[in-house]
């Protein structure tokens, strides 16, 4: 009898699927809760949503036509200060990274990944047939590795997901200068941080900085990502990217509209940062974060804490799925003041009650 499954690539046997934050409808059904009563703080979404101009722009988008990315790329170039030639776009930053890894990684290659961090870097490496090398971060979650020599690609995240700390410029320069490979710096959360290191792309031919429209711009459901890259990488990216870069007509319209209303984005970011600092001050032992989330240590196993939170209608992230995060870490997204109050009430009851 033919076993068609034998056609699957062997690498899939070692692949752990990406674990996303749990959804409102899923929890409502599982716990018998009303969806509108649930507070979702497990996926680092923006609770204030996109600019009011986004939905009208989407409604006007000619969905019978294939997307044209030029206006989106032009708006990104204006926003970032990079030339259009240096701006890459894709279906979420995941889509951008997927194309980039296929440019550089193959069987026998290695990638360098400081952990804990975003697990998709490992998945992309393995799907290319390459082998990830993991190096644990230090006690302050800093990158301790002094050299990326031998790695075809190095994946860094700043602010790092899930720990919330940023990469120092001197550490990035050291790693970029230590390797003949490509360094990818994930700045998905940079709009909530004090500074960006994207300007170094102009100095180094082997540095790419990835960004997303999902967080600060509130467009998580539309999957819009981009990167800033040296022209020689950008040229090859455009050769290998999927048709229309995996974008849609409506997502392009939304991206252009969101970038045309930076005041809304900056206002929502300021509110999130203010609430982040409030949460940090009200939770004993909370570490500073420069993302739109906090990374908290729990006395009880994180699985038990996350489950107890779900019973109270609050979704947070159990960080066991992050390699090297251990069994006592949770991540909570910064929500609106009302959402954060719900979280604090549940957290105090579950984690600080005698």
Image (cartoon, helix red, strand yellow):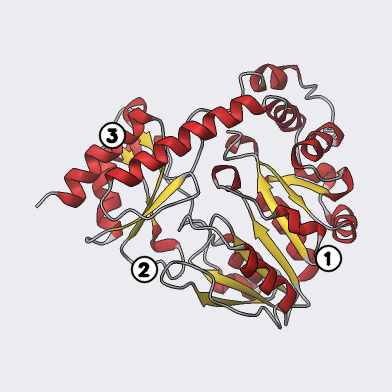
Residue 14 appears left or right of 212: left
Marks 3/1: CA distance? 47 Å
Of callouts 2 and 3, the N-terminal one: 2
x and y, in percent, of residue 83 in the image: 86, 45
**Neighbour class for label 2 at 10 Å: few (<14), some, many (≥20)?**
some
Figure quadrant of the N terminus: bottom right
x and y, in percent, of residue 137 in the image: 48, 72
Q: Which residue lies under the disc numbered 3?
A: 342
Q: Nearer the viewer, mark 3 or mark 1?
A: 1
Q: Which residue lies under the disc numbered 1?
A: 205
Marks 2/3: CA distance? 26 Å
For residue 326, the mark is: 2
**Neighbour class for label 3 at 10 Å: few (<14), some, many (≥20)?**
some
- Please tell me in which quadrant of the rendered image residue 258 appears: top right
Which residue does the image show at 76% across and 60% down from the upper left? Answer: 100
**Neighbour class for label 1 at 10 Å: few (<14), some, many (≥20)?**
some
Marks 1/2: CA distance? 36 Å
Of callouts 1 and 2, the N-terminal one: 1
Is residue 177 among what the camera can see? yes
User: Which is nearer the eye, 48 or 191?
Assistant: 191
Is residue 4 among what the camera can see? no
Q: Secondary structure at mark 1?
A: loop
């Amino acid at each position: 009898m033919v076993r068609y499954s034998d056609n699957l690539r062997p690498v899939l046997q070692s692949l752990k699927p990406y674990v996303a934050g749990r959804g409102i409808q899923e929890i409502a059904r599982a716990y018998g809760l009303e969806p509108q009563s649930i507070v979702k703080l497990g996926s680092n979404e923006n609770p204030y949503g996109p600019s009011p101009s986004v939905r009208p722009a989407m409604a006007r988008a000619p969905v019978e036509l294939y997307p044209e990315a030029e206006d989106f790329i032009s708006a990104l170039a204006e926003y970032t200060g990079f030339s259009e030639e240096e701006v890459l776009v894709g279906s979420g930053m995941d889509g951008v990274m997927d194309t980039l890894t296929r440019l550089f990684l193959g069987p026998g290659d290695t990638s360098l990944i400081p952990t804990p961090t975003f697990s998709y870097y490992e998945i992309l490496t393995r799907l290319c047939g390459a082998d990830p090398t993991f190096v644990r971060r230090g006690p302050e979650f800093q990158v301790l590795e002094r050299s990326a020599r031998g790695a075809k690609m190095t994946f860094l995240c700043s602010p790092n997901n899930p720990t919330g700390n940023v990469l120092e410029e001197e550490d990035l320069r050291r790693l970029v200068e230590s390797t003949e490979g490509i360094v990818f710096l994930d700045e998905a959360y940079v709009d909530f941080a004090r500074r960006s290191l994207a300007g170094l792309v102009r100095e180094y031919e082997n540095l790419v900085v990835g960004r997303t429209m999902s967080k600060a711009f509130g467009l998580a459901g539309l999957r819009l990502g981009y990167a800033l890259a040296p022209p020689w990488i950008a040229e090859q990216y455009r050769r290998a990217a999927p048709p229309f870069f995996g974008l849609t007509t409506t997502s392009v319209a939304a991206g252009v509209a969101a970038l045309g209303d930076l005041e809304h984005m900056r206002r929502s970011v300021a509110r999130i940062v203010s609430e982040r600092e409030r949460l940090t001050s009200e939770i004993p032992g909370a570490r500073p974060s420069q993302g739109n989330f906090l990374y908290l240590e729990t006395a009880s196993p994180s699985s038990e804490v996350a489950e107890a939170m779900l019973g109270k209608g609050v979704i947070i992230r159990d960080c066991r799925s992050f390699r090297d995060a251990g069994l006592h870490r949770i991540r909570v997204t910064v929500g609106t003041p009302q959402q954060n109050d719900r979280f604090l009430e549940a957290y105090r009851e579950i984690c600080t009650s005698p």
